[in-house]
Amino acid sequence: MTFVNSIFTWFMKKRMHQIELFVKYPHDVQDEVFRNLIASARNTEWGKLHNYDSIFNQEQFKQHVPVQTYDTLKPYIERMMKGEQNILWSSEINWFAKSSGTTNDRSKFIPVSAESLEECHFKGGKDMLSIYCNNKPDSLIFTGKSLALGGSHQVNSLNESIHYGDLSAVLIKNLPFWAEFYRTPDMSITLMDNYEEKIEKMARATMEVNVTSISGVPTWTVVLAKRLLEISGKKDLLEIWPNLELYIHGAVKFTPYREQFRKLIPSDSMYYLETYNASEGFFGIQDLSNSEEMLLMLDYGIFYEFLPMEHFGEDNPKTLGLADVELNKNYALIISTNGGMWRYMIGDTIRFTSLSPYRIQITGRTKHFINAFGEELIVDNAEKALTKACAETGAIIRDYTACPIYFNEDEAGGHEWIIEFEQQPSNIEAFTDIMDDALRELNSDYDAKRFKDMALRRPVVHIAQEGTFYNWLKGRGKLGGQHKVPRLANERQYVDQILAMMKTNGF
């Protein structure tokens, strides 16, 4: 296995030369991606409708094709799901990744072409390991197995040739045969739809396996880890998997989970690698150790545009190309992909932390913010404030959500938080004040509204009992890696539901 490990790590390192190429020539690479996308879709129904034959540069592209949402692309996608081809993309599309989103119960179905599988999703998976092996040349990761904890993996068929499932299902069903040798557990467990049963069987099936890496959403990885420790009687994961060296995570901010993972994996040499991927594509990989920023991956068949958030919501908003972005500004991400998602506003917001090379951080969702009073509070503000409050009060957060408290005749508005702690703060009032003060330092709009409690009063924080968010997701049929607790919402739907559930349970 050591010899095989050496071959794999050598192969992975070769890819680093190509990564270095797009780092050195980012605009040339993106221009080539753009031209290839336009050429590939020129004779599709979409390409003819938007006169792709007369598009020769990015400005013409913006003039011909408005910014799209899922709703505007949905009629085309529905036809593709019935078997029609050459609609949004030129090659045959037989797979769709089902994405439930986090602010809308309606499912979305994202076309997955052969090109997006090979040139984006699988390439991103290989690049994660390439970057890791480059940063840690003594890695023995390929001497053991990789445990991937995805979402619900049920695959559904619309007809003999058209299938859908969450992204995990689509990827696993299309993996090359050799990849199966390096993953655990076996397919019969991985493809289980009942998430609670899957966690139980996954824990029991992998206890005796030499797991060297884990990938998955932090929330559900913690659930699996705790079940493993309950069954085994061990005090941490390294007693179960002594060769564990890498944890690959994404989908939610890792900062609130960091302390939990230090307890679960008490090793200074454990490597944490963040990724930014979604049903629509693979976008970023943390290329520096001990960093909270990710390299924007520019050669995956995705053309990027960036909408300054001050123009979000405008008709025909002006978007920026890679050459025009600025550091530390909040942008809505807009993508055109080799699966036929054209100028699609994915719903995420990012900021650039570096322009050479282009590195980013996810700051939140276009729908995940609180702006009931002009405070423009985003997830990034919340995560930083909570991290500071935890550090100063000894708390560890498991999950949280927040929403506005609307004005009434007697009181100003405010924000209401529900927080489930892994370890409660020494003093919840001090925790609330530290969080509030940090938000005021981070966000000048929030600070202005908090002046003398005129528009915003001090936050209200509820401590949720253990399992509150898990049971809430379960009650909504939303267990699994694709489903996440909405961090911030500009309306009260989620908080009111959870508070009602807590009251029913006498808490």
Image: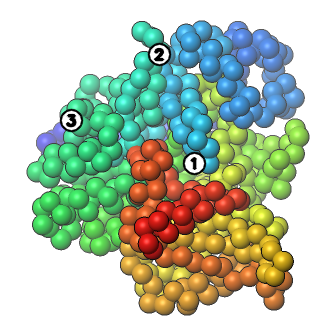
Q: Is 356 placed left or right of 217 in the picture? A: right
- Chain-order first, disc 1 or disc 3: 1
The residue sitting at 58% across, 33% down in the picture is 108
The residue sitting at 28% across, 55% down in the picture is 224
The disc labelled 2 sits on which kind of residue? Leu
Indicate the position of residue 278 as horizontal and vertical percent values: 53, 41
Question: Measured along the vertical axis of the image, is residue 80 above or below residue 446?
Answer: above
Disc 1 versus disc 3: distance between alpha carbons? 29 Å
Packing grade of label 3 (10 A; few <14, some 14-19, many >=20) is few
Number of marks in the rendered image:
3
Q: In what element is the residue under mark 3?
A: loop
Place residue 240 in its image quadrant.
bottom left
Q: Is 356 placed left or right of 448 in the picture? A: left
Is residue 222 something that shows in the picture?
A: yes
- Which residue is under mark 2? 158
- Which residue is under mark 1? 102
Q: Quadrant of the C terminus?
A: bottom left
Disc 2 versus disc 1: distance between alpha carbons? 25 Å
The residue sitting at 50% across, 52% down in the picture is 484
- Please state which of the two labelled residues, at mark 1 or mark 3, is closer to the viewer: 1
Q: In what element is the residue under mark 1?
A: loop
Packing grade of label 2 (10 A; few <14, some 14-19, many >=20) is few
The one of 93 and 76 positioned closer to us in this rendering:
76
Indicate the position of residue 282 as horizontal and vertical percent values: 52, 40
The disc labelled 3 sits on which kind of residue? Asp
Q: Is 348 placed left or right of 181 in the picture? A: right
Q: Are marks 1 and 3 in contact (CB under 8 Å)?
A: no
Indicate the position of residue 414 as horizontal and vertical percent values: 72, 75
The residue sitting at 83% across, 47% down in the picture is 313
- Which residue is under mark 3? 186
